[in-house]
Image: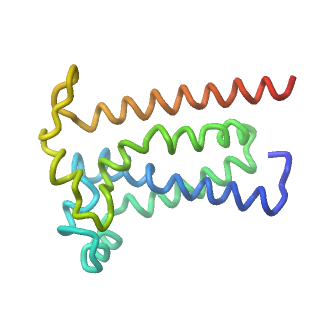
Amino acid sequence: MKDRSPTRNLVWAGTSLALLIPYAAILHHGVFYRPTCMLKPFGPDYDLATLSRLLTRDPSLGLALGLCLLTYAAGLHSRWGRCVQLAAWPLWIGFLPLSLWVWDIPFAGRPICTYWHDGRLVLPLIGRMHGRYLYAFGLGAALLLTLRNVRDERVRSL
């Protein structure tokens, strides 16, 4: 990043931290607690006891925070910093459906888990909804949005 102003660094820090949600969702659902939603192993809803168990027993949150720090550092200091920056929001947007699928909607009674998980959501042309479809969508959307960002960046530099 050429401009290292405090404001720009703060915006980049916030952008990197926003990736905590999809990073944690991917690590939790895809690696550590396959294939459950965020709270299922720890309790019924977003209450203090459940959140305490989640924070103390789920390694995905700590690792996701570490990935946020790596993203921040790579965006500022690596040779590929601008590419990392151009891919950050597309990654967040692309994996928003998976993040909602895994995190559910806090303090709303977990409607996604209650009504859609475990094969309850059936979509036309797709059939029963599975997490793998959300991973495929996230990767595809993130790639397309990143390519658009790179193209726009090139056009601006002409």
The x, y position of residue 113, in whole percent, is 20, 53
Q: Residue furthest top?
A: 125
How many numbered marks, from 0 up?
0
When asked about the image quadrant of residue 78, the answer is top right
Q: Nearer the viewer, residue 126 or 41?
A: 126
Q: Residue at x 36, y 35 (%)?
A: 135
- Left or right of 15 in this view: 154: right
Q: Residue at x 30, y 55 (%)?
A: 104
The x, y position of residue 27, in whole percent, is 37, 50
The x, y position of residue 67, in whole percent, is 53, 53
Q: Residue at x 59, y 58 (%)?
A: 69
Q: Residue at x 27, y 64 (%)?
A: 108
Q: Nearer the viewer, residue 62 or 46?
A: 46
Judging from the image, the colouring scheme is rainbow
- Left or right of 131 in this view: 98: right
The x, y position of residue 63, in whole percent, is 45, 58
Q: Is residue 81 above or below residue 50?
A: above
Q: Is residue 21 above or below residue 119?
A: below
When asked about the image quadrant of residue 114, the answer is bottom left
Q: Nearer the viewer, residue 117 or 25?
A: 117
Quadrant where the C terminus sits is top right
